[in-house]
Image: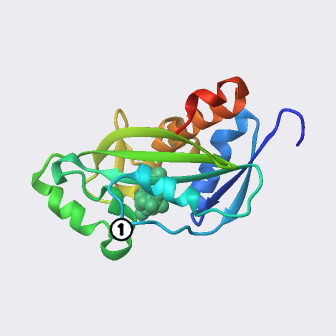
């Protein structure tokens, strides 16, 4: 390994997630490699369970392995779509959520659980960002629910903002900066066991 550089492999089928993670982790001396692959996701009640199952599903990679699971949670819909975010978006798109929110509280948050693994050890890191659901989709950047999510204190959606702006405050960036700090300070490695 080169001096001062930590090699980490991010296993994800989502190129948007990889681009964001690479930019967020670079300042921590992390050289992020990409293994483009979807991992088995169990039916589970929490992102943490899914993230742990994903990391347990990774085989044959040396060094640190990174996976993550994210979701959009809308409290006025009892947390929906939450852990079902991916399935719901693929099946239905934005329409039903926008319709359901016409007469409900539009507050929402994104959450990411990132998991790092090395040999048989695991560490997890959580990040969240609060905001509201826009009345209709706006913007072309990002991916997933970005066109309908307006972060707190913003007027534009994540999809209307440049990648750097999303990376300053996003759920994923917040989880990954915790992972980055952990990777940059080997002495703390035993204190963040997940
Ligand atoms: P998963 O972590 O890939 O299972 O993501 C769950 C769902 O949330 C997918 O539909 C993703 O596209 C979406 N999603 C995850 N992260 C983000 C994000 O940063 N912005 C918008 N949508 C996201």
Disc 1 is placed on an element classified as: helix
Residue nearer the viewer, 159 or 75: 75
Q: Residue furthest front?
A: 120
In the image, residue 190 sits, relative to residue 104, either above or below, namely above
- Residue 74 position, x and y percent, is 25, 50
Residue at mark 1: C-beta within 8 A of ligand 1: yes
Judged left or right of residue 118, residue 172 is left
Judged left or right of residue 176, residue 187 is right
Residue nearer the viewer, 152 or 59: 59
In the image, residue 155 sits, relative to residue 36, either above or below, namely above
The N terminus - image quarter: top right
- Whether residue 162 is visible, yes or no, is no
Q: Quadrant of ligand 1?
A: bottom left
In percent of the image, x 76 and y 49: which residue is there? 63
- Residue 55 position, x and y percent, is 57, 56
In percent of the image, x 42 and y 66: which residue is there? 42
- Whether residue 53 is visible, yes or no, is yes
Judged left or right of residue 176, residue 34 is right
- Residue 75 position, x and y percent, is 21, 46
The quadrant in which residue 59 appears is bottom right
In the image, residue 88 sits, relative to residue 173, either above or below, namely below
In percent of the image, x 44 and y 57: which residue is there? 50
Name the residue tied to disc 1: 89
């Amino acid at each position: 390994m080169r001096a001062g550089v930590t090699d980490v492999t991010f296993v994800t089928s989502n190129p948007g997630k990889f681009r964001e993670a690479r930019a967020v982790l670079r300042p921590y001396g992390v050289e992020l490699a990409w293994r483009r692959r979807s991992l088995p996701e169990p039916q589970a009640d929490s992102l943490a369970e899914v993230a742990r199952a994903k990391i347990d599903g990774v085989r044959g990679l040396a060094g640190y392995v990174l996976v993550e699971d994210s979701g959009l949670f809308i409290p006025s819909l009892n947390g929906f779509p939450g852990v079902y975010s991916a399935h719901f978006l693929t099946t239905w798109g934005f329409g039903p959520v926008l319709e359901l929110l016409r007469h409900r509280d539009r507050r929402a948050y994104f959450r990411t659980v990132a998991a790092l693994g090395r040999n048989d050890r695991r560490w997890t890191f959580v990040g969240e960002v609060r905001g509201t659901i826009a009345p209709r989709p706006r913007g072309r950047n990002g991916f997933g629910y970005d066109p309908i999510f307006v972060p707190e204190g913003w007027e534009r959606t994540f999809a209307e903002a440049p990648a750097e702006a999303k990376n300053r405050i996003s759920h994923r960036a917040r989880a990954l900066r915790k992972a980055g700090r952990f990777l940059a300070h080997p002495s703390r490695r035993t204190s963040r066991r997940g």
